[in-house]
Image (spheres, grey):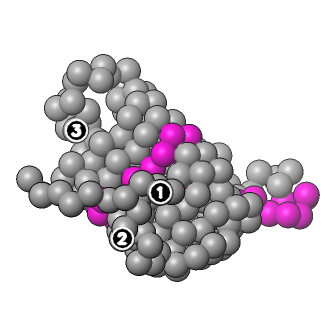
């Protein structure tokens, strides 16, 4: 039984319905359910609960409720100042790593779990998991889906509705299904933040 739990993090086929796995999973899911019942005004309570829920929780992490995660966020490792809009779904059957200052639009899904193509194995309920890594200061657009085993580099923007099936490098804008690099972040982006809208000089506070 212990061996089955270990296979969750090795990429091997395993049975997620193992009784010891389920026993632990339900504890984390119950805690996440409590988080989703908090009020928006209960900021400090939410921050405290996130530090208990997540595998790693940096300073200033904020996740809008409802937040969904297979293991209640226990296998999620978030850096500092990570923000997630409503309905972030983390299929965290194995580890998900998110760097500092990364933002998620609403309805983003990060999946680590997969199932064999061979029907006979699916019928026996086998599963495998591959970790996902998202870099520092990324922006993951609304409705994006990130599939098992994917790595996204620092500063990258993933367009809304994209399905990320393979690794995406740093410092690019990538969009589509399947998600492909559209262009690098460039000098134009230093001058314009949206179409013909120029970035005005500002002072940091």
Question: What kind of element bears circle 3?
Answer: helix
Residue sitting nearer the eye, 97 or 176: 176
Q: Which residues are magenta?
A: 97-121
The reply to whether callout 1 and callout 2 are in contact (CB within 8 Å) is: no
Label 1, residues with CA under 10 Å away: few <14, some 14-19, many ≥20: few
Query: Quick check: is 99 in the magenta stretch?
Result: yes
Q: CA distance from mark 1 to mark 3?
A: 38 Å
Q: Relative to 113, does residue 167 appear above or below in the rendering?
A: below
Residue shown at 37% from the left, 21% from the top: 37
Q: In the image, is 10 to the left or to the right of 176?
A: left
Q: In the image, is 134 to the left or to the right of 137?
A: right
Which residue is disc 3 drawn over?
47
Question: What kind of element bears circle 2?
Answer: helix
Q: In the image, is 89 to the left or to the right of 113?
A: left
Q: Relative to 152, does residue 111 appear above or below in the rendering?
A: above
Residue 91 visible in the current orientation: no
Residue shown at 30% from the left, 42% from the top: 62
Marker disc for residue 79: none
Residue shown at 32% from the left, 53% from the top: 82
Residue shown at 43% from the left, 40% from the top: 85
The reply to whether callout 1 and callout 3 are in contact (CB within 8 Å) is: no
Label 3, residues with CA under 10 Å away: few <14, some 14-19, many ≥20: some
Marker disc for residue 190: 2
Residue sitting nearer the eye, 132 or 188: 188
Residue sitting nearer the eye, 20 or 205: 205
Where in the figure is residue 128, as x and y percent of width and height? 66, 63
Earlier residue among tags 3 and 2: 3
Callout in the foreground (1, 2)? 1
Which residue is disc 1 drawn over?
196
The answer to which image quadrant residue 164 occupies is bottom right
Q: CA distance from mark 1 to mark 2?
A: 12 Å
Earlier residue among tags 1 and 2: 2
């Amino acid at each position: 039984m212990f061996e089955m739990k270990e296979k969750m993090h090795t990429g091997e086929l395993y049975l997620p319905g193992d009784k010891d796995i389920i026993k632990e999973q339900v504890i984390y899911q119950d805690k996440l359910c409590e988080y989703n019942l908090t009020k928006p005004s209960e900021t400090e309570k939410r921050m405290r609960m996130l530090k208990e829920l997540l595998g790693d929780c940096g300073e200033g992490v904020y996740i809008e409720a409802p937040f969904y995660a297979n293991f209640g966020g226990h296998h999620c490792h978030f850096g500092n100042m990570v923000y997630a809009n409503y309905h972030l779904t983390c299929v965290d059957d194995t580890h998900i790593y998110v760097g500092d200052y990364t933002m998620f639009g609403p309805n983003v899904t990060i999946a680590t779990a997969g199932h064999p193509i061979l029907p006979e194995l699916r019928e026996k309920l086998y599963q495998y998991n591959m970790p996902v890594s998202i870099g520092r200061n990324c922006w993951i657009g609304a409705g994006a889906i990130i599939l098992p085993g994917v790595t996204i580099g620092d500063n990258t923007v993933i367009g809304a509705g994209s399905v990320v099936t393979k690794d995406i490098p740093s410092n690019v804008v990538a969009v589509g299904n399947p998600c492909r690099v559209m262009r690098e972040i460039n000098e134009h982006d230093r001058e314009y933040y949206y179409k013909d809208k120029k970035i005005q000089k500002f002072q940091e506070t």
